[in-house]
Image (cartoon, rainbow, N blue to C red):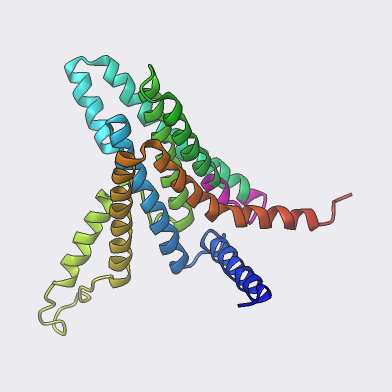
Amino acid sequence: MSRRHQFRRKRGLTGRYIRSARRVIAPERSGRADTQLGMVLAFVAGAANAGGFLAVGQYTSHMSGIFSALADNLALGAFGLVMAGLGGLLSFVAGAACSAILINWGRRGNRRDLYARPLLLEAALLLGFGLLGGLAHGTSGFTPLAVLMLCFIMGLQNATVTKISGARIRTTHVTGMVTDVGIELGKLVYWNRDPIRSEASPVRADRPKLRLLGLLLGSFFTGGVFGAFGFQRWGFATCLPLGLLLLLLAAPSLAHDRLQRRREPKKP
């Protein structure tokens, strides 16, 4: 294979990667793009949640458990744990609010990279979490700070994918997804007896939705396995490929939008 052919092949692969990455987080949405983005973010959330548990001894993606722990600790008089749980809750809310601010700012400015910016921030935070863990793990105050960072990251991601998909997809917790799977399976096995005589419409399962939910659950579980094995073997360095994955997803849209704005004529 000649060098020219190798160069053309690499350029073609790079071009396909850039087009695919931009399409997945483009403002114009499609079911395929939502599914692909949801799978990537569900994988990242599963890895961060499972790996984060091994790192700090707490799951940080679902607020139901934190709310329950708040109630339990308040009843038991463990006010220190109450404050810790409240900090995690407020960090999750702050992450979601930050995502909304970035996306709405981009939307009002007619920016093509409005969804890339929160993903870039999440990538930076994951990389920072990995660096912080490598340097400060075991020191005083590390665990509370790590919990706050992970809760912020999960809130940021969940709000981002919620905004992108029009609330069709959520990736940081699976309770709702498992519930929806049960609902659709119930519809799937429902026996529509005497459909002609019945005035009600026949019960039909939403098969595309069931497939989407299965893919998201599978991605979350796969990410959880990766995060658990990764933190056992490589420690906080496991966050580095997660951050790089999001960076590779967001970078083409950010670069393209910046290039387009440079080419636009300046207003007098």
Instruction: Quadrant for the N terminus, please.
Output: bottom right
Image coords of residue 161 (percent x, y): 44, 52
Image coords of residue 46 (percent x, y): 33, 48
Q: Residue pushed farthest bottom?
A: 196
Q: Answer with left or right where residue 65 lies relative to residue 111.
A: left
Q: Residue at x 17, y 17 (%)?
A: 76
Image coords of residue 243 (percent x, y): 48, 45
Q: In which quarter of the image is residue 23?
A: bottom right
Residue 255 seen: yes
Residue 115 seen: no
Q: In which quarter of the image is residue 182?
A: bottom left
Q: Which residue is drawn at 61% across and 51% down?
A: 107
Residue 108 forms part of the magenta stretch:
yes
Residue 182 forms part of the magenta stretch:
no
Q: Residue at x 47, y 65 (%)?
A: 33
Q: Residue at x 25, y 58 (%)?
A: 180
Q: Quadrant of residue 261?
A: bottom right
User: Which region is colored magenta?
Assistant: 107-119
- Say if 26 sits above or below 71 in the image: below
Image coords of residue 106 (percent x, y): 62, 48
- Say if 106 sits above or below 206 in the image: above
**Toward the viewer: 212 or 242?**
242
- Say if 9 sits above or below 166 in the image: below
